[in-house]
Image: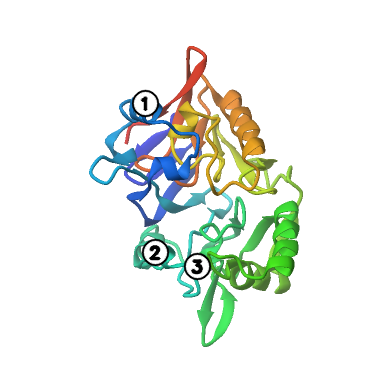
């Protein structure tokens, strides 16, 4: 079955995927984000990318903060839950969150309809809507869901927080992860966990120690939800450019190249967490390098 795209929705085999956007637009200077970036390479690649990937006026690259809703024949699955509406966050994350709520409900579902929530990793912008503050209590936003969390990732951040205290970006682990685990709403899984015939996880360490990809297959359509293995299409062209946010930049390169090699010149869609526009696309080889082609919206 073909992949069909309309606005923020993709039909992937028997599944409808909807991007639920929290914020989008210019966000980082590429040279601050990627320490190895050089002007000649950045300018060359941006010229080959759609205009929605960068903002010439500010000189910044565009990143989208979004969740992916998968409405399968059996389940409603949410991948990554953005920053959420908690207030104890660094200033740059305190933008309005009304758009996420509006787009979630516009998809025609309620919080109670979500069966599974999967966070590719446990950074602040991937766990935020796991919980809400209701009458002074932190409660699961999706009360009927099981939250799938990689055990390696969880144990790393549990130890990190015990040693260092709250993360500089805010108390996301304390208010969006621990209540889910301690309340019995989580499935702590191995890095090769298989949810069902549609989705299985695979390790993608480097950005964080326990990041995982969600590998998707429905009626002949394949996709890799790659989390933050890639932040911007520049990293498809330059896989050796890890971000300043990566815990192990060398390992992140290994992971990124492995993902690119697995889907290059195939029909498998690459869907990272922060790409803009139509979000998904295909990796193609260009000589000894890779390139990215967004699917048409």
Contact between labelled residues 3 and 1, with CB atoms less than 8 Å apart: no
* Element on which disc 1 rests: helix
Quick check: can you spot residue 134? yes
Which residue position holds label 3?
A: 111
Q: How many labels sit on residues?
A: 3
Q: Residue furthest bottom?
A: 135
Sequence order check, earlier mark of 3 and 2: 2
Q: Is residue 18 left or right of residue 151?
A: left
Q: Which residue is mark 1?
A: 40
Mark 1 and mark 3: Cα distance apart in space: 46 Å
SS for dot 2: helix
Above or below, 290 against 274 in this view is: above
**Residue 215 location (% of width, % of height):** 61, 38
At x 69% / y 60%, what residue is drawn? 157
When asked about the image quadrant of residue 166, the answer is bottom right
Q: Which residue is mark 2?
A: 105
Q: Earlier in the sequence, mark 1 or mark 3?
A: 1
Q: Of label 2 and label 1, which has the lower sequence position?
A: 1
Badge 3 density bin: few <14, some 14–19, many ≥20, Cα 10 Å: some
Q: CA distance from mark 3 to mark 2?
A: 9 Å
Q: Is residue 146 above or below residue 292?
A: below
Asked if residue 1 can be seen in this view, the reply is: no
Q: Is residue 183 above or below residue 73?
A: below
Residue occupying the point 75% across, 52% down: 152
User: How many other residues sit within 10 Å of disc 2, few (<14), some (14-19) or many (≥20)?
Assistant: few
């Amino acid at each position: 079955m073909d992949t069909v795209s309309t606005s923020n929705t993709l039909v992937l085999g028997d599944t409808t995927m909807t991007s639920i956007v929290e914020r989008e637009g210019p966000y980082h200077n590429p040279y601050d984000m990627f320490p190895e970036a050089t002007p000649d390479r950045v300018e060359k690649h941006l010229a080959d990318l759609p205009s929605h990937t960068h903002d010439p006026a500010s000189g910044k690259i565009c990143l989208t903060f979004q969740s992916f809703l998968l409405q399968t024949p059996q389940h409603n699955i949410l991948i990554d839950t953005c920053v959420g509406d908690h207030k104890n966050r660094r200033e740059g994350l305190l933008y309005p969150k009304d758009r996420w709520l509006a787009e979630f409900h516009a998809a025609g579902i309620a919080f109670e309809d979500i069966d599974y929530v999967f966070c590719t990793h446990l950074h602040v912008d991937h766990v935020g809507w796991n919980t809400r503050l209701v009458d002074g209590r932190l409660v699961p936003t999706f009360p009927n869901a099981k939250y799938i969390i990689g055990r390696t990732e969880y144990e790393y951040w549990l130890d990190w927080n015990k040693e260092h205290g709250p993360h500089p970006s805010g108390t996301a682990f304390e208010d969006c992860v621990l209540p889910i685990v301690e309340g019995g709403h989580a499935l702590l899984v191995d890095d090769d966990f298989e949810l069902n015939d549609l989705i299985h996880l695979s390790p993608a360490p480097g950005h964080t120690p326990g990041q995982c990809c969600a590998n998707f297959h429905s009626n002949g359509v394949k996709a890799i939800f790659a989390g933050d293995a890639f932040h911007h299409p520049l990293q498809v062209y330059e896989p050796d450019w890890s971000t300043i946010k990566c815990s192990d930049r060398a390992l992140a390169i290994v992971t990124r190249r492995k993902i690119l090699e697995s889907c290059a010149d195939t029909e498998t869609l690459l869907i990272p967490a922060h790409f803009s526009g139509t979000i998904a696309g295909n990796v193609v080889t260009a000589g000894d390098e890779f390139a990215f082609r967004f699917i048409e919206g």
